[in-house]
Image (cartoon, rainbow, N blue to C red):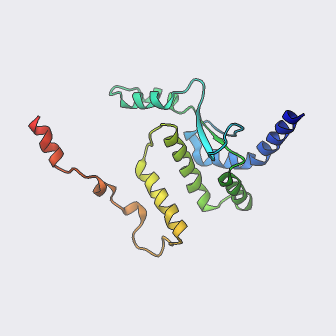
Amino acid sequence: AEYMGEKKRFEELTASFEPLCKIMKDILDKKVEKVTVSNRLVNSPCCIVTSQFGWSANMERIMKAQALRDSSTMGYMAGKKNLEINPDHKIMTNLKDRVDKDKNDKAVKDLVLLMYETSLLASGFTLEDPTLHSNRIHRMIMLGLGIDDTEEDVKMDDIDTGACITGGDDTADRMEEV
């Protein structure tokens, strides 16, 4: 009897989160095959699951490192990711409420992409554009601190991330020595 109650609850949650799943899929577009409600997540708001025939994070990393990789195979094999969301997590319930109130909430797109990219990292995948991810995090930090990004003339996209990389020319000099 308890199992049937759990199953019924899960079906109700799945139905109520359907609009959020659809919007998340629209935002993520080709990055994921589908967005579904999960019954196995406990602590995290969402996770990346590779389909049975898609590459694992490690295999994808190996294939990206190959010099003579076939880009058509990469797109096909690497594109078999599913995003599972946790209907009991505060982030997801809050996101669902936001979407129910306003489908076009601007923060939702950033939040969904941030959660997707964070799930990718947590699952061992590499990000296609780490700079974009950093900019999203910076925008969320500014939002959290109550800083209006229109106040400042400096846009997050204009920040030169190359300046953060240390080493400069002396690494090239060390290569010469070898």
Residue 68 shown left or right of residue 143 in the figure: left
In the picture provided, is 159 more to the left or to the right than 89?
left
Q: Residue at x 87, y 34 (%)?
A: 4
Q: Quadrant of the N terminus?
A: top right
**Rendered image quadrant of residue 101:** bottom right
**Residue at point 42% right, 32% down?**
61
Q: Is residue 39 above or below residue 74?
A: below
Residue 23 at x, y percent in the picture? 67, 49
| The C terminus: image quadrant | top left
Q: x%, y% of residue 58? A: 45, 29
Q: Position of residue 18 (x, y in %)?
A: 74, 45
Which is more toward the observer, 32 or 16? 16
Q: Which residue appears farthest toward the right when viewing the image?
A: 1
Taking depth in this image into account, of 76 and 148 the one nearest to the observer is 148
Q: What number of labels is visible?
A: 0
Tell which of 82 and 28 is nearer to you. 82
- Residue 44 image point, x, y percent: 62, 45
